[in-house]
Amino acid sequence: MTRNFRSILHGAILAGVFLAVSLLAVPAAHAVKANELVKINSATIDPPLRAGGSSTLKIAATVIPDWHINSDKPFSEDYIPTKLEIGAPVSVTPGAIKYPAAETMKLDVAAGGDKISVFGGDINFEVPLKADATFAPKPGDALTVTIDYQGCNNNECLRPASVSTTVALAAPGAAAGAIQGTSTSGEKSGGGDDPGGAIARIFNNHGWFLGFLAVFLGGLALNLTPCVYPLIGVTIAYFGNQGGGHRRVMYLAMVFVLGIALMFSSVGVAVAMSGGLFGAAMQNSFVLVALSIVLLTLAASSFGLFVLQPPNWMLQRAGAAHPGYAGALLMGLGMGVVAAPCIGPIVLGLLLMVERSGSALFGFALFFTLALGLGLPYIGLAMAAGHIRRLPRSGEWLAWVEHLFGFVLVGLALYFLDPVVPNNLMTRILPYYAVGVGIYLGFISREGRGWRPFLVMRSLIGVIAMAALVFMLYPRQAPEKLRFVPFNPELLASATEARKPVLIDFSADWCIPCREMEHSTFIDPSVVTEAKRFVRMRANLTAQNKKTAELTSKYDIQGVPTTMLIDSAGKVAQRKVGYIGPQEMLTDLRQVD
């Protein structure tokens, strides 16, 4: 009976999962300059620094919405790391800098499918300070705080820049105000905007209503995890013994779900008040390994190696059916503890979001909404508890579905292990793992063979998996790439004399959209053919030197990729900043004489 209900619940919630994912789309970013990406909001020394004592310098900054900067430890040497630099008098010694917890983003397949480590939204730094016995600050003495960064969005990357502020030492704890920092090309930096992070952008770009709706649907999706299955039996046992009419049972069920919500909300409040401990933990290899072990353990339950069920004392208490709303609330609080280990990617993302916000109220509201989504099905289950025995008995096809979700949990474990294993090995393995699972469930598994319609369905899955495997293993000739020569002013002048059009690609090794164009636009057959009549040059702006500064100044390069098309008369016919798709590039090329 329980297995049957699980499968019904799985099917009902899948539509909600797809809807939640559709809400995560981020609108196109607006044009900004490199000196506008980061703003230092405050820099304070707490407690005040005294001679022979120690204190902590706390810096709060903001990355504008829809943009991110590389973390202090990017996954590739091609990316420029964020660095915090402290300028202090000889009587003050800064300690090891505590950087904010980084977010991991996965690039599109067109950009190589790699992962990047970034900062976004509100970011906070902490630096321990120690003053020697001669520390005696005078008016005007100050610490200098500088953040060096390089930022990107989904469309372009901007050149490296920096922003600075000073913190007065004579009046400890009070920031002296932002000083305009200097970018590597000699421009001033400043400006900021509202906070926003990878998950927070859901709220910033779509509003609070759609943001909380996505969280609510994510709570529904948590019912797909095996560790919430014990709630089904307990709910049936508890409400099946409750007296009264349907209205009273419904009210009791709502109080029951309220108990679950209160327990979950306490987690959100605790993370908000942890001061960054959770985010730091999620960067720890031991934590990721432990989390993967938990997921593999839950997967083992789906494969039938052991039965996941609530403790006997809980079943006994549920069977006793303590009457009244207080009993329902206490039962919900207990079930919140049982459901707490259901930590999937949605929950982890929300915890990181709450940690960055630092707001206990926001953490409470976010996880309260998540728990309401988790508990909603149990209101209906409580209403039907008296008639639940009428459900048909489970069959082999339900065991097949449990195995499917077990394999999903194994896949999640591999995903969390990816940062621990070198060379993105798990990311490379996952496609083949998915294909292997499809073949096993389609052709090898013994479950679900007795019911012909289900046999047809699972066989179709196997056929699709086999086709995917053939596609992955089939040797394919590498597409012809558009070839560029290094930028050369003399070659540009000779092309003008020969009345040939010119294509100049300004790019950098740390530019993610540049990689996307390299793997999509510049291998498109139509683009390659049309561009052959152009003199094609590439200006690599990776190195921050005098030559790069002269190029960016001469051609007013604000970000990369920048694509410049020059016609046969030597006039700039087209100039665009950001990613250009194959069709758009083809149209632009055809418009140049």
Image: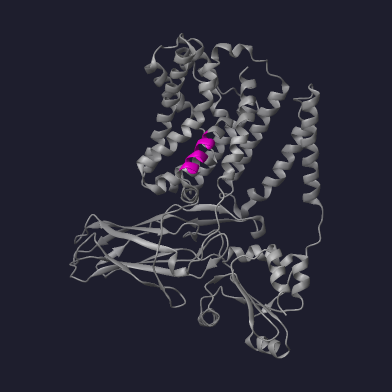
Q: Which residues are magenta?
A: 209-219
The answer to whether 548 appears left or right of 8 in the picture is left
Can residue 246 be seen here? The reply is: yes
* Residue farthest toward the bottom in the current orientation of the protein: 497
Instruction: Residue 410: give x, y in percent of width and height.
Output: 63, 37
Along the line of sight, which residue is nearer the eye, 419 or 201? 201
Q: Is residue 46 above or below residue 583?
A: above
Q: Name the residue located 52 percent from the left edge and 56 percent from the top edge.
A: 117
Can residue 506 be seen here? The reply is: no
The answer to whether 491 appears left or right of 270 in the picture is right
Q: Within the image, what quadrant is residue 259 found in?
A: top left
Q: Is residue 479 above or below residue 361?
A: below
Quadrant assignment for the N terminus: top right
Along the line of sight, which residue is nearer the eye, 321 or 419? 321
Is 101 part of what is drawn in magenta?
A: no
Instruction: Residue 258: give x, y in percent of width and height.
Output: 42, 26
Instruction: Residue 83: give x, y in percent of width and height.
Output: 43, 64
Along the line of sight, which residue is nearer the eye, 397 or 12? 12
Query: In the rendered picture of this protein, how many numbered marks are placed on residues?
Result: 0
Is 210 part of what is drawn in magenta?
A: yes
Q: Is residue 541 above or below residue 124?
A: below
Q: Within the image, what quadrant is residue 7 found in?
A: top right
Instruction: Residue 262: give x, y in percent of width and height.
Output: 40, 30
Q: Determine the main secondary structure of the stretch shown in magenta.
A: helix
